[in-house]
Image: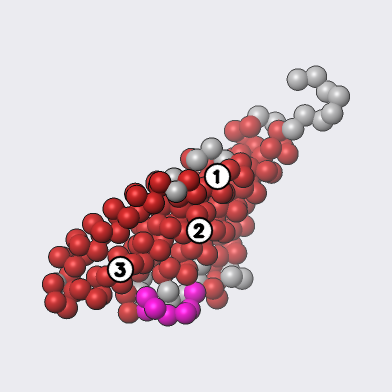
Amino acid sequence: MPLLTALALSIGILGGIATWLFVGPLAVLGLQIWAAFIAWAAYYHSGGKEASLKTNIPAHIWGAILGWIALYGITLLAGSLGVPLAAGISVAITVIVLVLGANVPALAQIPSSVYGYASVAAYGLLAGKMATLTSGSIIDNPLINIVASMIVGALFGWLSERIAGALTAKPAGTAA
């Protein structure tokens, strides 16, 4: 089977299964399918294979932590500085740290760090989670939720690549 066909099948079918899991049996966890798909895409964008897991998952977590710190900084500074200035300062500082983190080989995937950062910010702001930043709940804490969602997404990326590889493998002894 051609690689693109194998990838279409494995990603499409697993995408359907992941969506069903996230909005069905695992909905109680509140995981975000969109964040999982971002991590899944980052897996392929970074070249796939186990090497992508080793660089993307730490980068997603790094970015998510810094996105959470930015949100928390906004909540701390907004009362005295106002939201626009608090947000600007919080984002400036955390993004500088995010990019400097790329000096560490495990955090060198700057785009993947940005995906984690943006996903935490999106969930925190758009889902109204600013008041629950320090919650221990996977549903309410944007950091915990997005990190879990992105790890699952990266693992689905790895699995879809493995399945596509199996579908394109030639049986032993056949001509190429």
What range is drawn magenta here? 132-138
Does residue 36 appear left or right of residue 117 in this picture?
Answer: right
**Distance (Cα) linking label 3 and label 1:** 28 Å
Asked whether residue 133 is drawn in magenta, I would say yes
| Three-letter amino acid code at the position of disc 3 | Leu
Residue tagged 2: 150
User: Which numbered mark, 2 or 1, is in the foreground of this view?
Assistant: 1
Residue that mark 3 sits on: 71
Q: Residue furthest front?
A: 103
Residue 30: in sight, yes or no? yes
Mark 3 is surrounded, within 10 Å at the Cα level, by few (under 14), some (14 to 19) or many (20 or more) other residues, namely: many
- Type of the residue with mark 1: Ser
Q: Main secondary structure of the magenta part?
A: loop
Q: Nearer the viewer, residue 154 or 51?
A: 51
Q: Earlier in the sequence, mark 3 or mark 1?
A: 1
Nearer-N-terminus badge (3/2): 3
- How many numbered circles does the render carry? 3
Q: Of helix, strand and loop, which one carries label 2?
A: helix
Front position in the image: 84 or 104: 104
Q: Secondary structure at mark 1?
A: helix
Q: Earlier in the sequence, mark 2 or mark 1?
A: 1
